[in-house]
Amino acid sequence: MFTDKRITVTGGKGFLGTHLIRNLSQRGCHHIQIADRPEYDLTKLADVQRMYQKTNPEIVIHLAAKVGGIGFNQEKPAELFYDNLIMGTQLLHEGYLRKIEKFLALGTICAYPKFTPVPFKEEDIWNGYPEETNAPYGLAKKMMLVQSQAYRRQYGFNSIFLLPVNLYGPGDNFHPDSSHVIPALIKKCIDAIDNNDKTIEVWGTGSATREFFYVEDAAEAICLAAESYNKSDPVNIGAGFEVSIRELTELIAQVTGFTGKIVWDKTKPDGQPRRKLDTTKAWEEFGFKAKTNLMTGLARTVEWYKNNRNLCRR
């Protein structure tokens, strides 16, 4: 039944969106529409309403978001809060008004409290304030969880909420002003090799830990949840491992071939001290478990970047 549904993917031209569209197509989904810029500005209600009227979806998978690394979050907290909040609120509400069958909202690990016990369990999501550098973004996305649960309780509206960790992989954002840590480090290392630089500079102390989720695995998790998960309880999706930023930087240097010195700028923030998800519920509820290990994922991402650097400069 899932493959015959009319599916609209917001942000379908983006990093995760392109992989998800491919996964849906490979599953035999025949009616996939993309809602993305420049055709639709999903912060504007008129565009959201026009999108629903034109694509007439039965299922909406909401990936569209304004995102970035620590620096971007520090520079644009108001934009990150407003744009993400208003997109989610309007899309879910208009979906309810049109009686669509299902709305899948993608949240973020940034919604978790700063000092969440590791591994992060879904029931801990309200036990504190998020890490300050990305709290506006994290809280804006978390409001979709509140809305999802409220609309199910009052209206019986079928919406679900997934919590992914940091994504990476081929097609990632490598722009230095807004990229996340893995593409930023890959670019730093390859630029240093090209320029014969003997050092690269990395923010923080390197002690913070993160979990990284290969984008093709994330697309698979979303498809499985869209097919068979029908509750408003949040579900973590991730790879289930933890690596320090220092170790990650050394791995990326190894994969790219950078042999120079890594200099740590300890005046810059580390962000949340630790991040690792408990992904038990994803397995129990819809049978998802990540398949791609970090070294394999990094190698594929580096290879993609080397072959597509000219596209990334545009």
Image (tube, grey):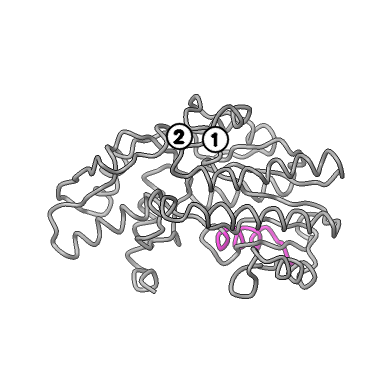
Sequence-wise, the earlier of marks 1 and 2 is 1
Q: Residue 166's spot in the image, x, y percent? A: 47, 46
Q: Residue at x 22, y 43 (%)?
A: 264
Q: Residues within 10 Å of mark 2 (few under 14, many from 20)?
A: many
Compare residues 127 and 174 and report the one nearer the observer: 127
Which region of the structure is painted magenta? 17-31
The quarter of the picture where the N terminus appears is bottom right
Going by the numbered disc 2, the residue's amino acid type is Arg
- For badge 1, the amino acid type reads Tyr
Q: Secondary structure at mark 1?
A: loop
Residue 28 lies within the magenta run: yes
Q: Is residue 287 above or below residue 49?
A: above
Quadrant of the snapshot with the C terminus? bottom left
Q: Is residue 301 left or right of residue 83?
A: left
Q: Name the quadrant containing residue 84.
A: bottom right
Q: Position of residue 301 (x, y in %)?
A: 39, 56
Looking at the picture, tell me which residue is in the foreground, 280 or 146. 146
Q: What residue does disc 2 label? A: 275
Query: Measured along the vertical axis of the image, is residue 5 above or below residue 260?
Result: below
- What SS does tag 2 mark? loop
Do labels 1 and 2 touch, CB within 8 Å? yes
Residue at the far top in the pictured view: 117
Residue at (63% x, 52% y) in the render: 85
> What's the distance in space between the residues labelled 1 and 2, CA to CA?
9 Å
